[in-house]
Image (cartoon, rainbow, N blue to C red):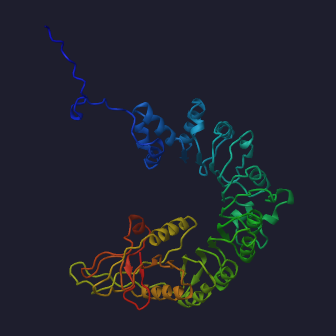
Amino acid sequence: MRQTPTTNWTSPEPNKLPPKPPTLRPKLPVEILDVVFSFLSIESLRSLLLTNSFISALSLRRLYHTVVLNRPHSIINFFKTVLANEALPPLVRGIDINMSKSTPISNFYFLFHNVLQQTKGLVSLSLDLPKGHAPFWMFEGCTFKLRQFSTSMYCRRPLANYLETQDSIVDLTLRGYQTDTMFFLPFIDPVPPSMLLPPAMRFTLSPEALPRLKYFNAVHADAYVIQAVVQGRPVECVSIPLFPDMSIASLDALCMSTMPLRRLSVISFDPSAPDFLFEALAKRFDQLEALHLVMLMAEYNQELLEQSGELLSHFKRLKYITFMAASSTPPVHPFPPPTNHPLSIGAILNPVSSSTTPDVDSMNDIQDSQDMAASTSQTSSLSSPVSVEPGDADEADIAKQWHRACPTLKTIILPKGKVWFQNAQDGPSSAGSNGGGSPSGPMPSDEDHDSGMDTMDMGPVEEPEWSVL
């Protein structure tokens, strides 16, 4: 009898399964890929456009998410590309245009107007235009709701009218002047620039405008504009200028916020600011967590810094403080060692870094340095004390005095530009290594060397250690 063959129904071994064809789509979720792509450069994103359709779509979305342009040719090409492709306008979330060094004509603004009408999902807009250019008609017919807005247009009634239509703005930056007189002679006219305008042209906001405003930055605004923006709104983080005869009025305007200030940056053009500024701030803003003071037209001395420390006791939550000004007694630099005679370590002191006068844009670098120092917690003991340069020892004493007056302080930047931070552990420590000791404290980055900040330590002291970044 013929035997019927049986079929083997057992599954093959796992190691003998046929390999799956490679997939062109990554296994990571789209949200994670989008975050990864956000760290790529523009050149890398452009190269990814040539890959498969999935990767190309992600890179295209990230490439047009936030557009930052400052050359007229590139700006016009961007406008034409967006208008020629219907799939691109919905991808744009942020536009940063800088035309301050050019002279755009009406055709440029008409083209820009068409782009703004198409980018309905826009949430961030920064416009740096030539002085005197204020084409507010560009916003007619636009339906986007901004959360961040920055402009160099005049702080006058037309700008206020537009801000009243944007109730979702959280971050506002006004870089424009109020009048042409303020541009040429900002410190001579005793009358506030806003008061020189006719009443119909003054910057005035309705009480219902900007109900969500939290961050306010002003570059040339006087006390009148500051009050118009801050009064009755939940502003918590502010950066303002102080002009002669208007400093106290500007600080009083900040008190009109419905929320206590947490962060305050001040660029002072008032020569008399050292006589009253610390006391005025301590009495008005005791809930501050970060305070940055830059005095461009005033000098400081050791006595002023010591007296200011007593006023810091009014602050209850202050963690970061910056004080930058020109010294009334410039430091004397020691001679550098001869290059043909080797010297032992510590035989001669390094030159003390000279103090510089920061500009308005330096406040971002100062804040980055403080955030980096505050995020560092690793410290270690040294086998021998660290030499402190003459001048730096004075700043070390000031840092200790300020911390005694305000125990919540964690990071201090003083006029020499060094970042003093409190170590997380007791005992002497340093931001570098010494005598075979292991590195400790925040290690200096390339940005720190570019900004002229030296790396050193105060040496062993009895109270909590303060090192310098």
Tell which residue pokes out farthest to the left in this image. 1
The image position of residue 347, as x and y in percent, is 27, 87
Q: Is residue 392 above or below residue 38?
A: below
* Quarter of the image where the N terminus is located: top left
Q: Tell me: 402 left or right of 337.
A: right
* Quarter of the image where the C terminus is located: bottom left
Question: Residue at 41% across / 92% down in the picture?
Answer: 462
Tell which residue pokes out farthest to the right in this image. 199
Question: Residue at 79% across / 59% down in the picture?
Answer: 203
Question: Residue at 59% across / 51% down in the picture?
Answer: 101
Q: Is residue 348 above or below residue 147?
A: below
Q: Residue 44: name its quadrant.
A: top left
Q: 208 or 216: which is nearer to us? A: 208
Q: Is residue 423 visible?
A: yes
Q: 254 or 24: which is nearer to us? A: 24
The image position of residue 239, as x and y in percent, is 63, 67
Tell which residue pokes out farthest to the front in this image. 1
Q: 226 or 187: which is nearer to us? A: 226
Q: Is residue 302 above or below residue 410?
A: below
Q: Tell me: 214 left or right of 189.
A: left
The image position of residue 258, as x and y in percent, is 74, 68
Question: Residue at 85% across / 60% down in the picture?
Answer: 198
Q: How many marks?
A: 0
Q: Is residue 272 visible?
A: no
The image position of residue 95, as x and y in percent, is 59, 46
Q: Is residue 88 above or below residue 335?
A: above
